[in-house]
C-alpha cells in the first residue's frame, strides 16, 4: 500500500477490509472504505487532482484558485462489501 495523507485528511477503513498488492491511496480530504470491502491489485484511490489544472499565476491580478495548490478535493466513500477490481481508478467525489 502506497499511502499519502494530507495534513487534515481523514482515512477510515472499517473492519474486515482487504487491500491487495500495489494499491495507491492519496487523501487530501477524506477516504472511507466500508466494512468487508476488497481493494484489488494496482488500484488508485485519489481524492484530489494531484496537480494544478491551470498554469501557475504570474500576475497579482489573477484570483487565488484552489487548482493552484494541487486541485480541488472531494472525499471518496466506498460502501460496505464492495469489490474494487484490478486496475480501477477512483477519483474525487466517488
Image (cartoon, rainbow, N blue to C red):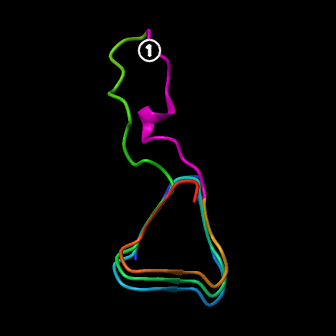
- 80 or 2: nearer the eye? 80
Q: Tell whether 76 sits left or right of 1.
A: right
Q: Quadrant of the N terminus?
A: bottom left
Report the residue at 37% width, 30% height from top. 54
- 64 or 38: nearer the eye? 38
Is residue 46 something one can see in this rendering?
Answer: yes
Q: Tell whether 87 sits left or right of 48.
A: left
- Magenta stretch: residue 20 in it? no
Q: Is residue 91 above or below residue 71?
A: below
Residue range of the region highlighted in magenta in the rendering: 61-75
Is residue 11 something one can see in this rendering?
Answer: no
Q: Is residue 45 above or below residue 17?
A: above
For residue 55, which quarter of the picture?
A: top left
Residue 5, horizontal then vertical, whole percent? 49, 60
Report the residue at 58% width, 50% height from top. 74
Q: Is residue 92 above or below residue 37?
A: above
Q: Tell whether 83 sits left or right of 79.
A: left
On the image, numbered disc 1 is attached to which residue?
62
Amino acid at each position: 500500500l502506497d499511502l499519502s495523507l494530507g495534513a487534515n485528511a481523514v482515512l477510515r477503513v472499517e473492519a474486515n477490509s482487504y487491500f491487495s498488492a500495489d494499491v495507491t491511496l492519496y487523501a487530501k480530504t477524506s477516504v472511507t472504505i466500508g466494512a468487508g470491502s476488497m481493494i484489488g491489485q494496482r488500484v488508485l484511490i485519489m481524492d484530489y487532482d494531484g496537480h494544478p489544472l491551470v498554469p501557475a499565476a504570474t500576475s497579482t491580478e489573477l484570483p487565488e484558485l484552489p487548482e493552484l495548490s494541487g486541485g480541488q478535493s472531494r472525499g471518496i466513500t466506498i460502501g460496505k462489501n464492495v469489490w474494487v477490481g484490478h486496475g480501477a481508478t477512483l477519483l474525487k467525489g466517488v
